[in-house]
Each structure stands twice: as C-alpha cells, then as structure tokens.
Amino acid sequence: MNVAVVGGGISGLAVAHRLRSRGTDAVLLETSGRLGGAVGTHARDGYLVEQGPNSFLDREPATRELAAALNLEGRIRVADPSAKRRYVYTRGRLRSVPASPPAFLASDILPLGARLRVAGELFSGRAPAGTDESLADFGRRHLGRTATRVLLDAVQTGIYAGDVERLSVAATFPMLVDLERKHRSLILGAIRAQQVQRRALSAGAAPKLSGALSTFDGGLQVLIDALATSLGDAAHVGAKVEGLTRVDGGWKLSVEEHGRRAELRASQVVLAVPAHVAAELLRPLDDALAAQMARIDYAPMAVVHLGFDAGTTPAPDGFGFLVPFEEKRRLLGAIHASTTFPFRVEGGRVLYTCMVGGARQPELVGQDEAALTALAMEELRALAGVTARPTFTQVFRWPRGIPQYNVGHLERMAGIDAALQRWPGLHLAGNAYKGIGLNDCIRNAARLADALTDEDSVRK
C-alpha cells in the first residue's frame, strides 16, 4: 500500500508520520511553501508569538505518544500555575471565574439569582432522544438564561468563536450530552465521575496525564519542525493537487510542483485540507458529497499580538479573559501570553494575544493590520485598563479560521461518511469534521493511520 496525504497542516503531518512509522509508504503534498498550516511560531524582537493555536492540554495520550516518538517530551513546557486563574468580562469589568462550586456560589461572576438558578441544575431533565440541540438551548435548560449568555457563551468563544445559538451541543461538547444521558443532571454526573476517579486512584490505577496547559520550549513550531524532519523528502511543499481520479482500484493525482506537472498513483488518498478545499477537489467526482462538505462554515479570526516594554504596564494576572457577546465589545478575549508562558518574552516584557472576529463579528477581520492593532489597543484599554502603548505588534488573519459545528453537523458528517463508502481508498482528516483542537487532530490522525495499516495487514 502507498498513501498520498494532501495537506501539510498538523493533521496531514501526523497522518503521514504515523503511516511511515508503521512501515507504510506515504507522501505528503502541501500547496503552500511551508508545513504546519495554521500552526506556527514566530520569534521577533524578544517575543515568541503563535500565529494560530496557542497551546494544548496535556490530557491526550496520542499527543504524548507523538511527542515521545519525536523525542520531544523533554521540551514540553507547562503553563505557570497562575494560568489556572481565568477571567470573564461581564457587567462592566473583569471578574474571576470561580474554581469550585462553593466559590461559585460566593462569587460575583453572576447575579445572585442566576447563581441560584445554576444550583438548581440538580433538578434538570433530559432532552428528547434524537434531538440535535443548540448549545444555547441546552444551556438554558440546565443552567438558566444568564449563565448561558455569560459563562457558556464565554467558554465556547474561547474554543469556537461561534454563535451559541447555532452551535450543536452534541458536536461541540459531547461530554455534556453524555453526562445528561447517563445522569440527567450535569452536577450529579460530575460528582459521580469524581467518585469513580477517586476509587480508581485509591485502587492503584495509574494516574492520567496531568491535563495541564502546555506547549514546547520553542512554541508549537517545535512539533511542526520535528514532524517535517521525520518525513524528510516524503514531504513536498509547493505541490498543488489539481485533480483526483479513481483508476484501477486506486487513485491518480494530478500535481503541479514548482511549475512542473506530474501524475502520482496511490492506493489510498487522505485529504487533510480545509473542507472547502476538499470540496473543490471532489466536485468533479461527486457533486453531492462536495456540496455537503462545502456547507461546513468557518468563523474568520484575527490574532493580534501586543507587546509592551518592561515596566510600562503591570504584568496581568492569570491566563487571560473572555468576553461574552452580550457585552457588545469588539474583542473576543485576550491571552496573557507572557504570564502563562513567561519564556515567550525577554527581559520582563508583557505580551497580550488578542482575538478578534468570530462567527458573530466576521467583518472585523477584513480590516487592515493597522486598524486591527488600533482596535485591540482600544479594547484592551477599555476592558483591562492597559494604557501603555505597545512597542511590538504582529497580526495574523484567518478568513476561514475555525470550523463551526453548528446544529446539523453530526447529521452532515453521517452523510459525508456514507458518501465516502462510494469511493474506496478516499479518506478525510482535519479539524472540520470530528474535533477542532490540536489534540483532536492528532488523535484522529493516529486512528486513521492505524486503520489504514491494520486494514492493509488483513488484506495481506
């Protein structure tokens, strides 16, 4: 078996690496001049900034396994303990997110009536079976209207930058739906899960991964560079796949690489590109399949880094803050990058990473870099009281930034999976389908690579 992996983001790199580590001949084809896709780290003027994803939670075995295979475990850096403190901008100021149920009830994160309504979640009921409920509807049923508008909306903003009224709870937070199905109440489910975990630990079960917020000592680019090195000449940049044809029990790819056209034969093809790019490749083959993939929405996103000289502004506390949509601000939130990972700055400097745009304010991302920088500065002043002028700025814009798992996503995915059965040897990978995070991409890539190699072993 030989496999052509189309797309050199984290999913494509992880699939190709896993295939080759298991003895399968795999080649990776990336249209642009660099590998990594949205993942990338830039070092400039004493700052280390991320162009896309900022970090990962050390709770996914597949990510740890990949780091170990690449000899990177010793380069993992855990966030500063202060990063456990997080803030939400609500009712005119930043408010600390409580770390425990008793602290929540005593806090001012929500008005008293809204906090008591959350406590009433113990009496929540289940949704009708088979319902694809929006995250907002689910939240209102379990937590109440205010907690949904403030807390649940802030949580999803930090992950999806989406619209809480449109996102599918089953697709975005399946663990919540699982808790409801098994325990009815989320609070009861969480209590019982903690009891099970404590019993397992007391019985001598091996502790799980730390779950700590983590990155690498040189940023996430360290992982991309290690994957690229492991693939060597099997990874091609500047190689655009222009056509895909089913031939003789396999696939033919028409490729333009550095101005030269060629044809590549493969028994299996993995499309690890954004959904809309995969749709265009598949349209001549299967218009119905392509149409389903093209309907997966993306939220535009701009990442604005603002760096301040030492002593010009106080170092912010905690990981950062998020802003619910009801506040009608132009900032989705900000990461206190220099507090969370102090090694990202030199000499006591301060670095904020601001997020702009999302599903509900997509027009903001279309502004030029100067306008986005000014916007971030104005919002940071209004929300966090930062009055100093930055001496470092860098902006990254992603017109199609974050896939939106809106209501109907799981049904659409079932249709896509069924349609793929018409095309043996064709597979999809990437964050548009079954998980948007770095851990999701690595886990799903490993599963796909293992399925392909195990299937090939059975055939032999």
Image (tube, grey):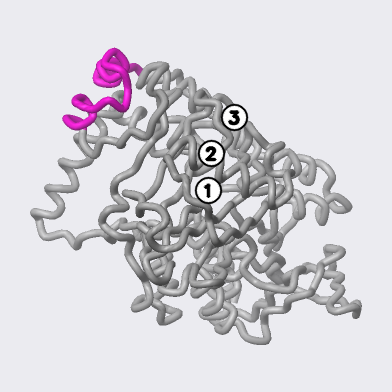
Q: Can residue 174 be seen?
A: yes
The mark nearer the N terminus, 2 or 3, is 2
Q: Residue at x 68, y 69 (%)?
A: 5
In this rendering, the answer to whether 422 lies above or below 144 is below
Q: Amino acid at mark 2?
A: Glu
Q: Nearer the viewer, mark 1 or mark 2?
A: 2
Tell me where residue 422 appears, x and y as whole percent. Answer: 75, 51
Mark 1 in CB contact with mark 2 (< 8 angstroms)? yes
Q: Which residue is mark 2?
A: 379
Of the two numbered discs 3 and 1 in the rendering, the one whose residue sits closer to the viewer: 1
**Up/down of 5 relative to 79, above or below:** below
Q: Along the line of sight, which residue is nearer the eye, 248 or 34?
A: 34
Q: Which residues are magenta?
A: 101-125
* In contact (CB < 8 Å): disc 3 and disc 1: no
User: Does residue 343 sit above or below 98 in this rendering?
Assistant: below
* Quadrant showing the N terminus: bottom right
Query: Which residue lies at the image location 60% right of the left edge and 47% below the top edge?
Result: 433
The reply to whether residue 457 is in sight is no
**What amino acid is at disc 3?**
Val
Q: Earlier in the sequence, mark 3 or mark 1?
A: 1
* Residue found at x 62% / y 40%: 357
Mark 1, residue position: 354
Residue toward you, 430 or 258 = 258
Amino acid at the residue labelled 1:
Cys
> What's the CA distance linking mark 1 and mark 2?
9 Å
Tell me the number on the disc at residue 380: none
Residue 71 horizontal side relative to residue 253, left or right:
left
Specify few, some or many for label 2: CA neighbours under 10 Å numbering under 14, 14-19, or 20 or more.
Answer: some
Inter-mark Cα distance, 2 to 3: 31 Å
- Label 3 SS: loop
